[in-house]
Image (cartoon, grey):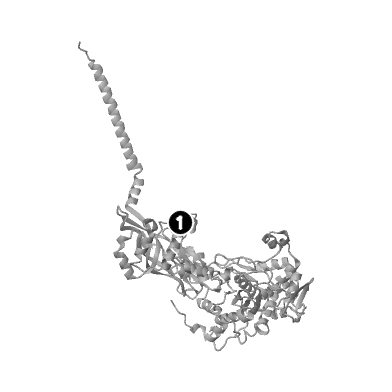
Amino acid sequence: MTELRNVEADLAQFRTRVVVAGLAVLFAFGLLAARMVYLQVLRHEDFDAQAESNRTAVLPVVPNRGQILDRHGRVLATNFSAYTLEITPSKVEDLDSTIEALGELVDIQPRDKRRFRKLLEESRRFDSLPIRTRLTDDEVARFTAQRYRFPGVDVRARLIRHYPHGEVASHVIGYIGRINQREKESIEEWPEEDQANYRGTDYIGKLGTEQHYERELHGVTGFDRVETSAGGRAVRSLANTPATPGNTVVLAIDIKLQKLVEDMFGERRGALVAIDPRNGEVLAFVSKPTFDPNLFVEGIDSENWKILNESIDKPLLNRALRGTYPPGSTYKPFMALGALETGTRSASAVINDPGYWMFGNHRFRSHGDGGLGAVDMHRSIVKSSNVYYYSLANEMGVEAMHDFMAPLGFGQITGIDLKGEVRGVLPNQEWKRKTYKRPEQQKWYAGETISLGIGQGYNNFTMLQLAHAMATLAGGGVKRTPHLTLATENVVTRERTPLPTPTEVNLGFKRQNIDTVLRAMHGVTVEGTSTRVFAGAGYLSGGKTGTAQAVTIGQKDRYDARKLEEHQRDHSLYLAFAPLENPTVALAVVVENAGFGAAAAAPIARRVFDYLLMDQYPNPQDLAAVQKGEAGAPIGTPLKASEVPWISP
């Protein structure tokens, strides 16, 4: 039996299917069209930028680092171009075998390998690290011919920082080094604009002026937009924003004077700071021994680092900024001024000095077994009477001494333009409570006040603080922030921008009180402890010798340098200013473990004044005597300082 189909129903069903299929197709095409509109219109700029970024790359152009000059324009830090052989560890399969193979093409010394390993520990594996710097043209040619054998190794042309005078003024100038991981993390916390300025930068200031004026010296990073191949190799430059070189930093120090002072120290340890009291400019800032900052530029090797870091002389310690010393008798002029300003004692008041001072049952000695007899304020400074200042300290008390000395800068941060300055110790009862833990240690005993009067006890200050206080006194009681830098200079426009005028604070001392102390300090040079050193000087100056204990000697014991190890002997100090009328230089100097202040420290001060005020330079015989601590006044005929040749780099 034949089944009849409903043609109309089938046709209707077909039409329905066609319509549904057509709608589905139209919907699909609608989706495609919408996607095309989204991609081609709404996201056009984004995808165009992505395509452009795939085709191009933006490379940072690191700026030339600015130079550092002394006050007379002598170059202290500069750059030179050289080829460097560098390895990117993440791109090298076998680092040791690669280095050995490279050693067959270029000269790689064991110290180069040690330095590379040290850098490897401090850096990320995708950083490019130098294995050899300053390649010769022959070495560059040999490596280039074999370049295909060493994936991850390349030769780069770099500007290398150079310190042409080596160890001279190294603590002032500082050095640069590769940015380590800790510094990279710190940079990531900077504002976005500052971070962008350090893209591509591998080096940063680590110490001294290089560190403090990092932003000035670094410059502004440029950018080079280049077209790249599918393999990422640059094909051609499309646009360029040149880098702006860093500014030149002009220091206030005279590098010739700086070197002279360092030479006068010889192999001895110590520090000297010389300041112009009229404006706070630092003319010399010496710490001995020094070090060669060139060792740190590409990463110091472990052998040299061990020598510097483990030396008993501590050459890496900036003694002028971070070394603290008891001021000894150089503290007495400030104690005298404190007595006058607080009304504790008049200049004419006479104290008997029998050679000792009794406090309860305790005997404080002075000048061995002999005394000075009747002593007023002038004679107490000229002859350096301990008894006078034992009794004065007892009368003033620790709190009054602290409150008077703090504004002068003792135990305070001076604000000099170097990082890492230490505060030292200007003691009082609050300081002792904060310093010690046990209740019996926190209590202030009256006997502890006595030795403070002669600059011993808990007193500990830097040479920068002592020079700053001396400059304030010589400047009529006006405290000016010391500064090492005079100006910055735009390397493009040559426009020089002086640093802002340093802060000035008038401490309000009476002029007659200042003059009383300064006249007594002048007496030290003509009838006191430094008379022999300043004999025949062509100017009038003032000073104060000091001898500070490196180790405590009992009151019943006699000091004998021959029985002590060299590092246990007394320090030699001298505080001075010149000329007497309208001083233009004030300084503080310490020669560690060198004994009496007039024997070692004062001769150095004399020759600094001779250089600055008389244009005189010690002859070789005189210089040798100063280095040995055997000099008084200059020996023989001084040289003319302006005619002594400066060996330019």
On the rendered structure, is 570 left or right of 173? right
- Corner quadrant of residue 606: bottom right
Residue 619 seen by the camera: no
x and y percentages locating residue 390 in the rendered image: 74, 73
| Quadrant in the picture for the N terminus | top left
- Quadrant location of the C terminus in the rendered image: bottom left
Residue drawn at (33%, 37%), measured in percent from left and top? 34
Which one is nearer the viewer's eye here, 235 or 522? 235
Above or below, comparing residue 8 to residue 93 in the picture:
above
Question: Which residue position holds label 1?
Answer: 195
Residue extending farthest to the bottom is 636
Residue occupying image coordinates x 26% and y 22%: 15
Residue at the outermost top position: 1
Considering depth in this image, is 641 or 89 the residue closer to the camera? 89
Query: Could you tell me residue 612's position as x and y percent?
Result: 55, 80
Question: Residue 566 versus residue 135: which sits nearer the camera?
Answer: 566
Q: Is residue 26 visible?
A: yes
Is 498 or 639 nearer to us in this picture? Answer: 639
Q: Amino acid at mark 1?
A: Gln
Residue 414, position as x, y percentages in the image: 60, 67
Rate crowding at label 1 as few (under 14), some (14 to 19) or many (20 or more) other CA atoms within 10 Å. Answer: few
Q: For numbered disc 1, what is the local secondary structure?
A: helix
The residue positioned 52% from the left and 65% from the top of the image is 212
